[in-house]
Image (tube, rainbow, N blue to C red):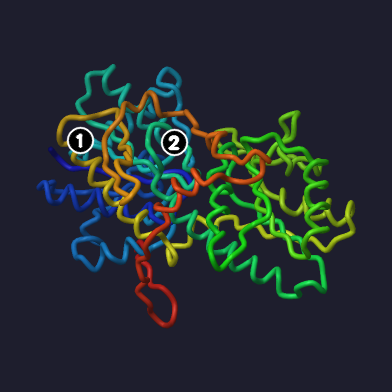
């Protein structure tokens, strides 16, 4: 095989760089000469913005630092590939850059939209007699890619959410019985509620956990929500509720849109969500006369490499290595999957799956993992999610803060 290139796309995670490390390590072990990185994903690749990863990762120190670096080291993009019939020049430009740099395989780390890019590029190559290979590496805190048991990035975000909620629960209870305090914690998740569900992991022998969890999979009833909180205030003084940013009312509107503000849309037509927690806190204050406030975890939950799950880091790295091995064996138009083979002890292996049954398909939280009340999670969910947040990788500190690897 000639040279290879790896890119990152969509929203980053705390472990997306570990997949880059895995790709690099496996390629070098296989004797690949040049491992290039796309700067700003496929959008940058169209402008031949690539770098030689040897400059950063040729030593173990570089790889160790990369795995402790948040965000996407190579830069990302939200570039929507046109249909081949509408943008032949885009596809031909990608293959032109690949041929110019003797690149035989392209690895793209991302979520649903990124896997669509892998699908279209591999289909175009097959239809036009091109020999380059295209392999997807799963990445998304949303955990909503099908086929794979879970997605690299989710475990670390879930660990951050559970940890932050334990801290917020303690903080919210500081005044005890002397003041009713309701805290709404808004968590990422457009259509799939995996991250909000992770709030259930805050409950353990040292923490009572959250009082309710609302997922986008369940239609949100505003009146029932107010009644629920009203009932809780009669039982306890401090209340913490986790809500997904993507919860919707019966007519299909996002709760954050109930204020009348229209959300901007990205290149893929996705409404930018924000403000759900604030709306609900204000609603409770006006309806019940309680002190209510909101905390929006926002991008903190995907950028917290300092508290990343070691299991997540290792699996992201493993997925990158598996992608290279798949391409070396002749695979193309596939995505690496993580397959759970044991729960106790937890064990996961990799495989590859046809990209056509993955791209543009979202996987939701199973309804049978939601409690009968519609706002709690079952023990089955915890058994699924708890192993994914286990372990830590201590940051490398410099001047009192974690040190990161940054492009020159």
Q: Secondary structure at mark 1?
A: helix
Q: Which mark is residue 163?
A: none
Q: Is residue 133 left or right of residue 188?
A: left
The residue identified by callout 2 is: 145
Q: Residue at x 19, y 65 (%)?
A: 59
Q: Residue at x 31, y 51 (%)?
A: 345
Neighbour class for label 2 at 10 Å: few (<14), some, many (≥20)? many
Quarter where residue 166 is shown: bottom right
Q: Residue at x 82, y 54 (%)?
A: 282
Distance between the alpha carbons at the discs numbered 1 and 2: 21 Å
Q: Is residue 58 left or right of residue 401?
A: left
Q: Residue at x 35, y 66 (%)?
A: 393
> For the view shown, which residue lies furthest in the left direction?
31
Q: In front here: 289 or 126?
A: 289
Closer to the eye: label 1 or 2: 2
Q: x and y percent of residue 390 in the render?
A: 39, 59
Which quadrant is home to the C terminus?
bottom left
The residue identified by callout 1 is: 327
Above or below, comparing residue 252 to residue 384 in the picture: above
Q: x and y percent of residue 403 in the render?
A: 38, 72
Q: Secondary structure at mark 2?
A: loop
Q: x and y percent of residue 382 in the render?
A: 49, 49
Above or below, comparing residue 196 to residue 209 in the picture: above
Q: x and y percent of residue 361 in the render?
A: 47, 28
Q: In front here: 120 or 167?
A: 167
């Amino acid at each position: 095989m000639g040279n290879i290139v790896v890119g990152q796309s969509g929203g980053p995670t705390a472990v997306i760089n570990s997949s880059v490390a895995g790709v690099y390590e496996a390629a070098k072990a296989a004797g690949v000469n040049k491992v290039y990185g796309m700067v700003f994903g496929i959008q940058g690749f169209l402008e031949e913005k690539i770098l030689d990863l040897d400059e950063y990762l040729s030593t173990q120190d570089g790889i160790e630092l990369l795995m402790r670096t948040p965000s996407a080291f190579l830069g990302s993009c939200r570039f929507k590939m046109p249909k081949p019939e509408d943008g032949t020049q885009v596809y031909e430009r990608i293959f032109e850059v690949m041929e110019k740099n003797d690149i035989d395989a392209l690895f793209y780390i991302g979520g649903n939209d990124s896997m669509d890019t892998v699908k279209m590029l591999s289909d175009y190559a097959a239809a036009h007699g091109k020999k380059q290979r295209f392999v997807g590496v799963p990445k998304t805190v949303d955990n909503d890619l099908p086929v794979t048991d879970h997605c690299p990035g989710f475990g670390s975000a879930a660990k951050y959410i559970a940890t932050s909620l334990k801290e917020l629960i303690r903080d919210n209870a500081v005044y005890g019985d002397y003041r009713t305090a309701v805290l709404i914690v808004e968590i990422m998740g457009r259509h799939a509620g995996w991250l909000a569900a992770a709030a259930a992991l805050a409950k353990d022998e040292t923490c009572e956990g959250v009082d309710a969890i609302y997922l986008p999979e369940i239609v949100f009833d505003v009146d029932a929500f107010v009644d629920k909180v009203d009932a809780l205030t009669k039982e306890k003084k401090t209340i913490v509720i986790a809500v997904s940013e993507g919860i919707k009312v019966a007519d299909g509107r996002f709760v954050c849109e109930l204020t009348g503000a229209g959300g901007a849309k990205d290149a893929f037509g996705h409404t930018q969500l924000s403000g759900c927690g604030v709306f609900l806190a204000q609603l409770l204050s006006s309806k019940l006369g309680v002190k209510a406030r909101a905390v929006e975890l926002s991008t903190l939950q995907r950028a917290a490499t300092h508290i990343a799950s070691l299991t997540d880091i290792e699996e992201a790295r493993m997925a990158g290595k598996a992608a290279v091995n798949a391409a070396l064996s002749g695979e193309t138009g596939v995505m690496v999957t993580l397959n759970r083979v044991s729960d106790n002890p937890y064990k996961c292996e990799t495989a590859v799956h046809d990209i056509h049954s993955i791209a543009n398909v979202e996987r939701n939280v199973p309804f049978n993992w939601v409690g009968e009340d519609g706002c709690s999670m079952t023990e089955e969910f915890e058994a699924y999610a708890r192993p994914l947040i286990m372990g830590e990788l201590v940051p490398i500190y410099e001047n009192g803060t974690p040190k990161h690897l940054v492009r020159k």
